[in-house]
Amino acid sequence: MRTLTRILIASSIAFVVTTGCNKFLETDPLFTQDAENYFTNPQDYELALVGAYDLMQGSFMNIWIGEIASDNSIAGGESVTDTKGLHEIDAMTHGAVNTELRSVFRWNYAGITRTNYLLENKDNINFTGKDQIIAEAKFLRAYYFFQLVKYFGDVPLIVDERLGVDEVSELDRTPASDVYEQIELDLKDASEVLDWTNPVKGHVTKGSALALLGKVYLYQNKFAESATTLDQVIESNNYALIDDYNALFSVGNEAHSETVFDIEYSGLEGGGYGCLICLEGNAAPGFHGIRQYDGPVYGDGNSYNLPTQNLYDAFSSSDIRREATILDLDAFISDQSNPSEITYAVGGGGHTGYYNNKYIKRQGEIGLPDNDLTSPVNYRVIRYADVLLMAAEAHSENGTDGKAQQYVNEVRARVGLGGLSSSGDALTQAIWQERRLELSGEGHRFFDLVRTGQAENEITDFVAGKHELFPIPQIEIDLAGGIWDQNPNY
């Protein structure tokens, strides 16, 4: 699997310190710092951790695939051949040759490589604060492996080491249960060291680790463990729902009390379509923006990931989350003082009339050119409402209906809705529906449908026994020497 080898090489190069040349053959200093003599001082570890965080930038792909593969959104865009992989995922015709799925595979392994590089050298020196760096690196490795296992199932498990060319070609897929075991171990280790707060904005905390661990348990139907773990986050009293649902995703309201784990983006560095993982900005809002839009509030964009009528109709008219989540563009324009002066275009990749109002390009939140790619809007990976709903589901599945009702009703009360009083299976299904209403547009829907067994009934053209997992990219199988089996029915 030479792709992993290339990632290893690129990761090592990223940490090489270079200097300018006075003349063609004169260098200063007269040595090169490489992967084998790195990690000799605390700053090396700090910089390596920054590099490990950097690959999280590709997580905008979760917003696309987690919505487009579900009943929440269609792919949209300029045409059905523009970002073809998303249209294939939308139609459930995706196969092993898919650019977007390969990006998910490669980018997450690049992140794992960087964490492993740091953790391989964790014992080189001792210094104050090293335990914090190691804990954050373990969290990041767990996060990257969790992305891979929920997309692809069995994946190669690589821990605390870099691999040579010969070793890579002999690496087999590891059972998902073993990958989950490593994820749990890393998150437990991280949660024991991390504090509830972190002075560095965007870095993870004890709450981040416990919330992700609770989610990992939920994905494995370990409901008792999930409930106990998520209760720790809730009972810590470090988080709270903010009053205004409409303010959840604004740049001006980052790091609010509902933020458990988010990914930092910057609008200060430009980028290009040739390397989306190189971006420091969030590509999702620009891709979700309104095509050739000329009007107030919003910016023009690429009209991808368009909410469906099915999702719009799932909300009651009294639920304020509908408008906060879904922009009904024609209704918005008709409410303006100058509707005849506001224009936009419809892309050939499909049009619903709706746009993702959580992650969309807005005036005042636009980064540097190309500003379709450089939004400063952070990706809220886990917010407190998600924790409450995961805990509610775990307690409901575990037979603790009282706590389940308490948690889900706290989420409903924030948006002015009455409490649920059902129990048993009816309560569990009501919590699943509440997850859709609360979290739609955020990239969770497809994976929620799969793990709860609802996907076959809710997603058009979903094939049970096949589409629960995405195919391993064929090029990765080829580069591994053909020793990997493909996921079933691909």
Image (cartoon, rainbow, N blue to C red):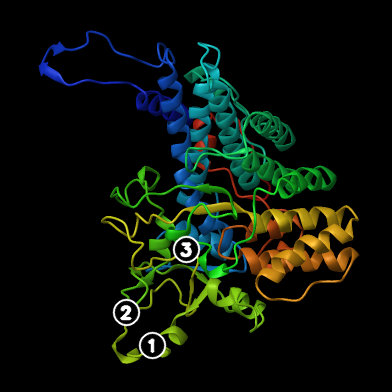
Question: In this image, 17 relative to 430: left or right?
Answer: left
Helix or strand or loop: what does disc 1 sit on?
Answer: loop
Does label 3 or label 1 sit earlier along the sequence? 1
Task: Report which residue position mark 2 lands on.
Answer: 295
Q: Are marks 1 and 2 in contact (CB under 8 Å)?
A: yes
Residue beneath disc 1? 336
- Amino acid type of disc 2? Gly
- Please name the residue that numbered disc 3 is placed on: 359
Q: Nearer the viewer, residue 101 or 19?
A: 19
Q: Position of residue 281 (x, y in %)?
A: 37, 51
Seen in the picture, residue 299 relative to 449 is either above or below; the reply is: below
**CA gap, disc 2 and disc 3:** 18 Å
> Residue at the spot x=51%, y=45% of the render?
104
Nearer the observer: mark 3 or 1; the answer is: 1
Q: Secondary structure at mark 2?
A: loop
Neighbor class of circle 2 (other Cα within 10 Å; few <14, some 14-19, many 20+) is some
